[in-house]
Image (cartoon, rainbow, N blue to C red):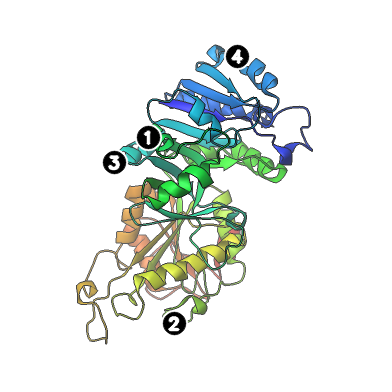
Amino acid sequence: MRAVIMAGGRGSRMAALFPDIPKPLVPVAGKPVLLRQLEALRMQGVSDITLVTCHMAEQIEAAFGSGEAYGVRLTCYREDSPLGTAGALYRLDLQEDFLLLGADIVFDFDLRKMLAFHKKNGASATLFAHPNSHPADSTLIEADAEGRVLRFLPKEGRTGYFANLCNAGIQIISPSLLKRFPHTGRADLDRDILVPASAAGLVYAYKSYEYARDMGTPQRLKAVEADLAAGLPQAKNAANQQRAVFLDRDGTLNVNNGFITSPAQLSLLPGVGDAVRTINEKGFLAVLATNQPVIARGECTEATLRQIHNKLETLLGESGAYLDAICYCPHHPDKGYPGEIPALKITCGCRKPAPGLLLTAARDMNIDLSSSYMVGDSWRDVQTAANAGCTPVFIGDALPENAPAGTLLFPDLTAFVKVV
C-alpha cells in the first residue's frame, strides 16, 4: 500500500517553540515526528511513501532525500502555493487505495486490521477513529452500528451530547472518491470530500483503541513524549494483549438515581472524570460494562440509552477522559412489565453476574482478563469479575458478605486509581 503524508502545513501553533524548522521536523523525544512515521510505516510493510510539502519544503526534502537510508522509497510533491488538506491528491498518480495521514501524528497500530475492515465494507474511505482527550475542540463523527459514517459534527456551533469519536487524521482512501468529487485547486479533505461522501454512505469509521495522537501543540507534544517514555504506543498495538479496567455505571461513575431512563437523570460522581483520565494515561482500556434491563422492560429505548451514554462521554471529556468501549446487556429475565419487549425477556449470558460482557470485550479487544479489573458497587459486579477471571473491586464502605475471595475494597473510583 502506498502512503501519502501531508507535510506542507505551517504548524503555526508550534512556531513559538520551533520557529526555524517545519513541524514535520519537530523532535518528539529526540526524533523528528516525520522520521517516527516513516519507521512506523516501514514496520507495517509500507515502503512506497509520498510527501506533500510546501512550507519550508527544502528542509524536509533535504532531511529525508530518497528515503533509502530509512528503508523506504520516498518521493516528494512540492506545492507552489498551499492547496489545502486534499488539493495535492488530485495531482498525484494514485491508482489504488492509499493510506493518507498528516505529518504531526505519532501512531502505532495494526494497519492490516484496518485494511481488512475497509475491504470488507467496500468503503470508498475508512477513517481511523477513536475517542480522544479533547473532544470539545475536535470534529466528532457520528456512525451507525456497522461503522458507516452518518455525519461530521464540527466543534463550531455544536450543542448537545455526542459520542466521543474522532478522526485521528489517518484514513484509507480510494482514488474513485477523488473522481467522484473532483477539484482543480485548493480542497479541504473533510468539507470537500469526506462530508459529501459520508452523505452518500461511502465512508466508514474504523474504531480502534490503538495509539494515534497528534503532537501539533506544545501541550500535546509534551503528552506524546510522556506516552513514549511509558511505552504506551507499542503497548496499545492490537497485536499485544491489553489490560483493562471494566467499569460499572450507576453508583461507580455516576450518581445512582435508580433506573436511569433519560439523560437528565445522569450526573457524574465527584472525581470520576479525573479517575478515568488516570486509567487512560496509565495505558489501561476503560470499558463500561453495565446491565440495562430498562430496555427489555420497555422503559427506555436503545436510542435514548445512546443519548444517556453520549452525555456520559461528554461529561468525561470535560475532564480529558474517555471510554474505549461501552458494553451493555439489554435483557431481563422476569416478565410482567407494561410495555416490555418479549424478545429481550430472556436469561442470557451477558447480564451480570454472568461474564458475557467481559468475555466478548476481551475477545474483541485482545484483553488479558487475568491482569484486568472490574470495578463496581454491587455484588453482581464483583461476582462478574470472578466469573470472568479478573480482579474484583468493590466500591463501598464494606465488602458484601458473599464477595468473592480476593475482592479489593475502596470507597470510590478515585481511591482505586490512586492505589492500583
Asked whether residue 168 is in view, the answer is no
Residue 120, label in figure: 3
Select label 1 or label 4 by which is in front: 1
Amino acid found under the numbered disc labelled 3: Lys
**Residue carrying label 2:** 258
Is label 2 in a helix, a strand or a loop?
loop
Query: Could you tell me if the residues under marks 2 and 1 are in contact, i.e. CB atoms within 8 Å?
Result: no
Q: Residue at x 79, y 38 (%)?
A: 16
Select label 2 or label 1 by which is in front: 1
**Residue carrying label 1:** 176
In the image, residue 338 above or below residue 110: below
Q: Residue at x 46, y 36 (%)?
A: 182
Amino acid found under the numbered disc labelled 4: Gly
Q: Nearer the viewer, residue 134 or 320?
A: 134
N-term-proximal mark, 1 vs 3:
3
Q: Residue at x 58, y 60 (%)?
A: 317
**Residue carrying label 4:** 65
